Image: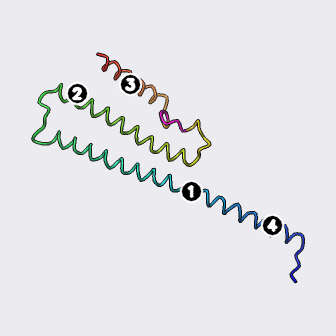
Amino acid sequence: MIEFTIKELIFLALAIISLVINIIQWQKKKTLYKPIKNDLVGLFNDIAVKRLHYYSTQKELEGQTNPYSDLNALKHSFLTFVSGTIIDLSGIREHVVAALKTMDISDREIFKASDFGLTAEEKKQQEEFFRRGRELQQK
């Protein structure tokens, strides 16, 4: 029969507890990985679609059949394009924030999607841009 000392029994118990904790942590990470992976796949697919739109706009401007005969038409189209690009970039930021939030869901205050990663100056510029956009829409 095998006999254990008190120290050996304590060591064995701690080793078993540690193994159980490691298995639980491994299972949590395993279930956490799939949503993050899916979100990143969606993000890269979204970027690919947006790049196609940007390239087609570029080709339209460079092509022989450029529809912008006067400067005002080009300005309007460019403003629309820039506004769409800003919205697209905000959508990309939403994907990244969702992935980050999935990694640590208990941290609710840090990852506010509308302000995530923006400096105070960038927040001010964003608000100014939206204010001017609202003014243009009211005219």
Q: Secondary structure at mark 4?
A: helix
* Image point (34%, 18%), residue name: 135
What distance separates the C-alpha of mark 2 from that of mark 4?
A: 72 Å
Snapshot quadrant of residue 129 = top left
Q: Which SS type dominates the magenta stretch?
A: loop
- x%, y% of residue 9? 85, 70
From this view, report whether residue 48 is shown above or below residue 119. Answer: below
Residue type at tag 4:
Ala
Q: Secondary structure at mark 3?
A: helix
Residue in the foreground of this view, choosing between 120 and 53: 53
What distance separates the C-alpha of mark 4 from that of mark 3?
A: 62 Å
From this view, report whether residue 81 is shown above or below residue 53. Answer: above
List the residue tagged with mark 1: 31
- Quarter of the image with the N terminus is bottom right
What distance separates the C-alpha of mark 2 from that of mark 1?
A: 47 Å
What distance separates the C-alpha of mark 3 from that of mark 2?
A: 16 Å
- x%, y% of residue 102? 54, 47
Q: Secondary structure at mark 1?
A: helix
Earlier residue among tags 2 and 4: 4
List the residue tagged with mark 3: 130
Q: Secondary structure at mark 2?
A: helix
Earlier residue among tags 1 and 3: 1
Snapshot quadrant of residue 83 = top left
Residue type at tag 2:
His
- x%, y% of residue 55? 24, 45
Q: Nearer the viewer, mark 4 or mark 3?
A: 4
Answer yes or no: do the residues labelled 2 and 4 have beta carbons within 8 Å? no
Q: Nearer the viewer, mark 1 or mark 4?
A: 1
